[in-house]
Amino acid sequence: MHIAALIAGLVCCLGVALDAFQTIILPRRPAGRFQITSLFLIATWTPWVAIARRVRNEKAREQMYSVYGPMSLLLLLLLWGLLLILGFGMFYFSMGSPFGDTMMGKAATVLGQLRTDLYVSGTTLFTLGLGDVVPHSLHARAVIIFESGVGLGFVALVIGYVPVLYQAFSHREVSVALLDARAGSPPTAVELLRRHGFEGGEEAMVALLAEWERWSAEILESHISYPILCYYRSQHDNQSWLSALVAILDTCALLISVIEGPSSRQAQLTFIMARHALVDLGLVFHIKEHKAWQRQAEEDRLPPEEFKRLCGALGDTQLKLCGDAAAATRLHTIRALYEPHAVALGDYLRMPLPKWVAVPRKNDQWQLLSKMRTEAEGVLIAAVRGSGRAAPAEARIDVHADEHGH
């Protein structure tokens, strides 16, 4: 029995030490599936999704999904602590419970000894030092000192781990929030191209794609090291890091397909980096083994009806897509490089993917502001023409842009 307790203690303590090292310190994704963190996420996310599915209210269901990320972090830290307490408790039990405990009495049972061992382990790990249980052997005293050091290190790792996660989360969400004004909410590729259809918009598009190329690299670096960040939801229901990433990939696919202008070159660079991040994150969760991977072949994010809407929406952006059969073929080929991974990952994380064409919204702030500008500039030009003077250059440029719906 004592040998079995010793082996169990070694398994618990070494398992937590290895998992904490791979999760917090190791800068690359560990190989294999039998890490405590991976097993914990698998064991908790699936039942959590099953419970959330039963919630009929969409906002309440999304709120449940958003709670999982922070809650799983706290539960994971709690699991590590409990396993360390159990592991060191097994060490003490394998030594024959060498403690003097007044509550245990003279006729100590095996269960009573185990309770004392776990109590000593818990108070030692969290460095309480109550002194109500006294060790009676040098080996027990040595293990107590070692466990106290492990407890201090555990607390230090927790203190350092949580701020790193939230800093990475906050940095990720800044770009996602900024995309709201540039591509709508939820973001779409067509809306992003339409809102950059002004004079100088191509240069702005190149700068934006370069920024998202770096953002994709940062996502790849941070979320591969800390996969639990993938479960963290954005603050707004219509936004998510996955929908933003897919919208950027859609935009790059359109620009690469038509092969026009300098933005297509930057689109290639951004596409490669964004797809790299998407595929590698899918490998972390083994999405190719889920049912969604087999089912995604039957789904089409851009059916013929949606493609017609896409062509109509792109009419103002002067992208020659619908009249060029080769461009449409290239678009279909490029989509096949990333859409299966996006669909499967979105199904696993319960994050809806963006549509290609934005659904019209009654209270869209961009449309309201554009309408106000058009009306104000119309009054200004009418007043200038009535006075016989030339309209300002800024007004002429803005009116020309608004004639194209921007």
Image (spheres, rainbow, N blue to C red):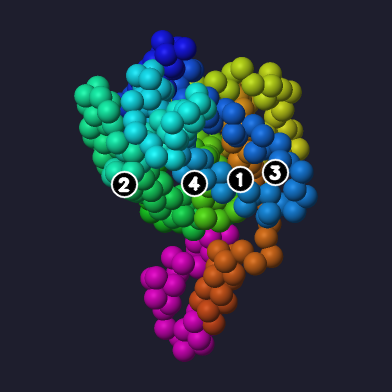
Alpha-carbon span between mark 3 and mark 2:
43 Å
Instruction: Using a 10 Å C-alpha cutoff, classify the residue at mark 2 as few (fewer than 14 neighbours), some (14 to 19) or many (20 or more).
Output: few
What residue sits right under mark 3 in the picture? 52
Location of residue 392 in the rendering, given as x and y in whole percent from the top left corner? 39, 76
Q: Earlier in the sequence, mark 3 or mark 1?
A: 3
> Does the residue at mark 3 contact the one at mark 2 (Cβ under 8 Å)?
no
Residue 13 in view here: no
Q: Earlier in the sequence, mark 1 or mark 2?
A: 1
> Does the residue at mark 4 contact the one at mark 1 (Cβ under 8 Å)?
no
Location of residue 191 in the rendering, given as x and y in whole percent from the top left corner? 56, 50
> Does the residue at mark 4 contact the one at mark 3 (Cβ under 8 Å)?
no
What residue sits right under mark 2 in the picture? 130
Instruction: Using a 10 Å C-alpha cutoff, classify the residue at mark 1 as few (fewer than 14 neighbours), some (14 to 19) or many (20 or more).
Output: many
Alpha-carbon span between mark 4 and mark 3:
16 Å
Residue 173 in view here: yes
Magenta run includes residue 401 = yes
- Front of the two marks 3 and 2: 2
Alpha-carbon span between mark 4 and mark 1:
10 Å
* Residue beneath the point at 70% across and 43% down: 52
What residue sits right under mark 1 in the picture? 65
User: Which contiguous range is marked in magenta?
Assistant: 380-406
Alpha-carbon span between mark 3 and mark 1:
7 Å
Question: Callout 1: helix, strand or loop?
Answer: helix
Q: Which amino acid type corresponds to the residue marked 1 in the rendered image?
A: Tyr
| Residue at the extreme front | 106
* Residue beneath the point at 68% across and 49% down: 61
> Does the residue at mark 3 contact the one at mark 1 (Cβ under 8 Å)?
yes
- Front of the two marks 4 and 2: 2
Q: Earlier in the sequence, mark 4 or mark 2?
A: 4
Alpha-carbon span between mark 4 and mark 2:
32 Å
User: Looking at this view, is 51 or 369 the one in front?
Assistant: 51
What residue sits right under mark 4 in the picture? 70
